Amino acid sequence: MKGNSKRSVTTFSSETLTQLREKSRELQESMCDLRGVKEGWRRAPVDPNVILSLFPTLRLKEGYRLVGFQFTSHENANGIVLAWPADKPVPDPPGDLWHPFSLQNFLQAHLQMHLGMGGWQVQNYFSTAIMPAIEGDGSPRSYLEASIFGREIYEFGAVWHGSDWSTHYIIGGDPFTEGASWVSDDSGSEPLDPFSREAWTVKEKLPADWSPTVTMTPKQARVEFYTYSALGFETLNLHRDTYTQGNYQCRSKLVQLATGKQGYIF
């Protein structure tokens, strides 16, 4: 850590983030095998509360529990996680819901019935904006964990065309001299060799240090980390999440630092 009494910067290893993601993926592996799974909405076979438990500096606010659903169609899948009132029953999805957004409308109606008198915002229960239901211990690592957990839970149960965040690999060192972090695929894991600088178009100033960092001030926490993705085109990216101290809902910005050759399309 470095800085003065009003501003501090904590540096983390890229392996810290990668390990959290790998553990989350291992837990969600059963949702990726869609053989024999009836298409449409189903209760997720994975408990999202177990995924949250991988992030020890974070916890649900009192009165909540996480519940998950998955929508499957033609070997593709998307998921949704809700912070549901702990004392309220969770309805099963009707069998006639065949649109990926139809369950959200159905569950919103149930939530509104339960919460309408309580003044809670229904939209804050869904994985697209679930972080208001999360609190942490206020440490720099808690904000780093919030940035990874928020992305993991947003892409909960996603398969094939439903994937985006899962195509990003954390970078901890200069990719032009050290390569990229370990990449997992069907054939195992192997590191990417250093990139050829001549094959890349640099669009923004590249950092001298590619390590993930959390910058703390009395009012804010800012998480920054870097990724490589080959979805569509190869890209090197800066992810910057800004939090108000004590609040684990962030303003997120993605900056494309450089582009390489054509990649792949799901």
Image (cartoon, rainbow, N blue to C red):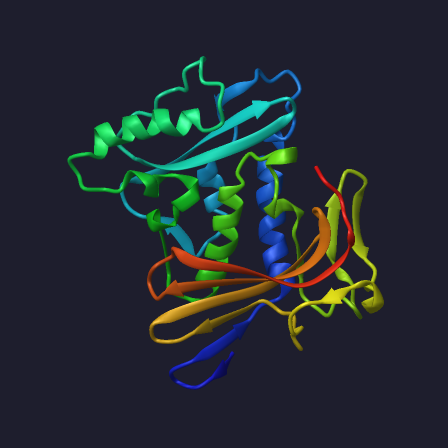
The spot of residue 158 in percent (x, y) is 58, 35
Give the quarter of the figure containing the C terminus.
Answer: top right
Residue at x 59%, y 57% (from the top left corner): 17
* Number of marks in the rendered image: 0
| Residue 212 appears in the rendering | yes
Residue at x 37%, y 61% (from the top left corner): 137
Residue 108 lies in quadrant: top left
176 left or right of 122 in image: right
Residue at x 64%, y 15% (from the top left corner): 36
Depicted 244 relative to depicted 154: above or below: below
Residue, far bottom: 4
The spot of residue 116 in percent (x, y) is 19, 34
Residue, far left: 117
218 left or right of 4 in image: left
Depicted 256 relative to depicted 78: above or below: below
208 left or right of 57 in image: right
| Residue 230 appears in the rendering | no
The spot of residue 77 in percent (x, y) is 58, 29
Depicted 21 relative to depicted 219: above or below: above
Q: Nearer the viewer, residue 175 or 253?
A: 253
Residue, far top: 96
30 left or right of 143 in image: right
Q: Nearer the viewer, residue 183 or 106?
A: 106
